[in-house]
Amino acid sequence: MNESLQTTLKKLRLSGLAQSLEVRLQEAAGNHLTHSEFLELILQDELLVRNDRQIQRGVKSASFRELKTLEDFDWQFNTSIKKKQIYDLASCRFIHENRDVLFLGPPGTGKSHIVQAVGYQAVKMGFRVRYRSIFDVVRDFLHDEAFDGHDKIMAKYLMADLLIIDDMGIKHLPKRSGEYLFEIIMRRYETKSTMMTSNRPLEDWGKLIGDVPSATAILDRFLHHAEIITITGRSYRLKDRAGSESTDKNKPQKDDGDNSNELSA
């Protein structure tokens, strides 16, 4: 590729095309491609690169705790999780319809993995996603309240097509948490989708937030168009430990009597 053409492609920000052009020129000559066939190939290369970069930007903006996929999920471990139901969520139809989703279940049953995997799928489909634990939410607003930045941080929560709030119920929240969460839910109500996870039953939310009226108002709006998915079962994180304990129990024990004989001998 001559230097002038390379400079022109850079100015046009066609880096994907620039990367593959040399190979595509050789392919076109070797396979006697028509001009339109050649053009289609190099434009597809450019689109692939742009799509990959868009996904990378979306993932960075989402701030996932971990990058998870549904393909990596162990569906055999917990049969209470309906695979078809989760993959239906991953189609992101609920985002198009501005519906909400709530996952309820004990710690370690896969809630965080699933919501982050669905969020990643939404990013790949071009949606703006924001992932925060409930502690991140409270910390964001407490920090920005001190610096008079409430509107700025709220705008970030309202902008996302899908907002994921994870870990509701891990422990009691600081004062005014209910106000922040209520404003987020109220202002996103019927306009954007919100997905939440909790390891505590809904009737405990008032105690967790420390504000029963706010908890009631939050649930009233959030559950109006929400799909509730309840997961049961034991913790996936403890499965290896349980297996190790089971193995230890099955190991043959030393005979104390034999040991005493050896010592006396």
Image (cartoon, rainbow, N blue to C red):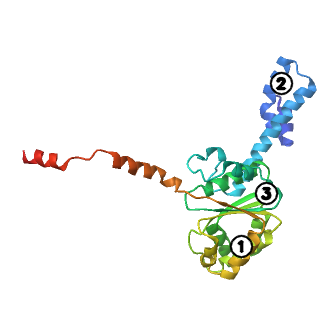
Mark 1 or 2, nearer chain start: 2
**Secondary structure beneath label 3:** helix
**Secondary structure beneath label 2:** helix
Question: Which percent across, then down, holds residue 55?
Answer: 74, 48
Q: Is residue 224 left or right of residue 244?
A: right
In which quadrant of the rendered image does the N terminus lie? top right
Q: Which residue is mark 2?
A: 25
Give neighbour class at mark 1: few <14, some 14-19, many 20+ (Cα, 10 Å).
Answer: some
Q: Is residue 51 left or right of residue 140?
A: right
Q: Name which residue lies at 89% across and 30% down.
A: 39
Q: Which residue is mark 3?
A: 94
On residue 244, the disc is: none
The amino acid type found where label 3 is placed reads: Phe
Quarter of the rendering containing residue 42: top right
The reply to whether discs 1 and 3 touch (Cβ–Cβ < 8 Å) is no
CA distance for labels 1 and 3: 18 Å
Give neighbour class at mark 2: few <14, some 14-19, many 20+ (Cα, 10 Å).
Answer: some
In which quadrant of the rendered image does the C terminus lie? top left
Question: Which percent across, then down, holds residue 165?
Answer: 67, 64
The answer, for residue 20, to whether it is visible in the render is yes
Q: Which residue is mark 1?
A: 219
Quarter of the rendering containing residue 140: bottom right
The amino acid type found where label 1 is placed reads: Leu
Front position among marks 1 and 2: 1
The answer, for residue 65, to whether it is visible in the render is no
Question: Which percent across, then down, holds residue 128?
Answer: 77, 56
CA distance for labels 1 and 2: 60 Å
The amino acid type found where label 2 is placed reads: Leu
Most foreground residue, 78 or 98: 78
**Secondary structure beneath label 1:** helix
CA distance for labels 2 and 3: 44 Å
Question: Which percent across, then down, holds residue 13?
Answer: 83, 43
